[in-house]
Amino acid sequence: MNGHSAQSVLVHAALLVDFDNLYSALVQQDSYVANQFATNPGRWLAWLEEHVPVFAGCSGDCRRRILVRRCYLNPQAYAHFRPYFIRSAFEVIDCPPLTARGKTSTDIHMVMDALDVLSQPTTVQEFIVLSGDADFTPLLLRLRKHGRYSAVLSAGYVSPAYKASCDYLISQEVFIRDGLGISEQDEEVAPHPPEPTVGRPSEALLNRMAARLHAAAVLPDGIEASELPEVYKEFPEFRLGNHWLGFFSLRRLTEALVTRRNDLVIVEED
């Protein structure tokens, strides 16, 4: 026996995870939260399947079953997270850098796979996209044309067009609290390295890193946040610790480097 009636409706879903995008956005805010996302996908997967309301327009007792589980990641930067997703029955699709600037083909892979799912014999009514990349807006519109429903989880800013194109927006706060099971109190007591014991990096090192960042952020496209850790890992001093050189987040370290040059600026996606 289970908790659902004989009249319950089973809704099939596809879950597409843009790992680099979501992880890099989370780590800018809190490395503990990002690590919980990356190392315990089974927990938030069960939450998506069992607790997030079904948004596929069905009435009555509806159940979600996630048939397609795909995680797209850059193996050069995040291969060590692969086993966690494999153990939760994800297909992990490697999306290595294709250019000198580290550009991957994650977005193209995700779009092609979503369109492939549309043509499968088993009807998938819902598509859940874990990414804040507004480039997926046309995909969401295409899914709507085919009578499918979509949900988006984005950490941080959400483009108005991207938000309007989906049927359900999973807020970052709800995902962290309910999906990851992390309360504000948990974040406060999370095991961050104590600031007083971390030596500040030298001015010379920060200047060298700022120069390297400028070289990597060549026009016209600049450099994505998800590509920054690979640039910083070129410096042995950065690789020695796990505290972002005492700045404790990707965002704060990058801001410190940007302020050292007049030809660098952080551009927020609109």
Image: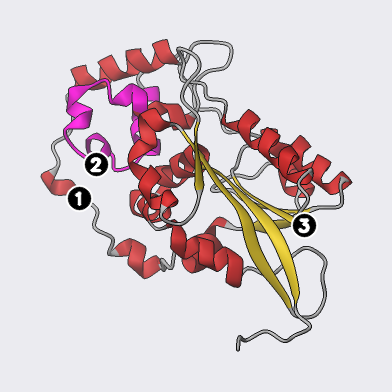
> Residue under circle 3?
125
* Labels 3, 1: front one: 3
Q: Is residue 255 in view?
A: no
Q: Quadrant of residue 204?
A: top left
- Residue 202 x/y as whole percent: 17, 24
Given residues 207 and 28, the one toward you in this image is 28
Which quadrant does the C terminus fall into?
A: top right
Q: SS class of the residue under badge 3?
A: loop
Q: Is residue 165 in view?
A: yes
Q: Kindly identify the amino acid type of the residue bearing the numbered disc 1.
A: Pro
> Residue under circle 2?
243
- Residue 67 x/y as whole percent: 63, 57
Q: Give the number of callouts.
A: 3
* Residue 244: numbered disc: none
Q: Which residues are magenta?
A: 230-258
Please say whether residue 250 is one of the residues in the magenta stretch: yes
Per the picture, the main secondary structure of the magenta-coloured stretch is helix
- Residue at the extreme front: 121
Judge whether 43 appears above or below 135 on screen: below
* Residue 67 horizontal side relative to residue 18, left or right: right
> Residue under circle 1?
193
Q: Kindly identify the amino acid type of the residue bearing the numbered disc 2.
A: His
Q: SS class of the residue under badge 1?
A: loop
Given residues 76 and 157, the one toward you in this image is 76
Which quadrant does the N terminus fall into?
A: bottom right
Alpha carbon separation for disc pair 3 and 1:
44 Å
Name the residue: 34% across, 29% down. 256
Mark 1, other Cα within 10 Å: few <14 / some 14–19 / many ≥20: few
Please say whether residue 210 is one of the residues in the magenta stretch: no
- Residue at the extreme bottom: 1
Closer to the N terminus: mark 2 or mark 3? 3
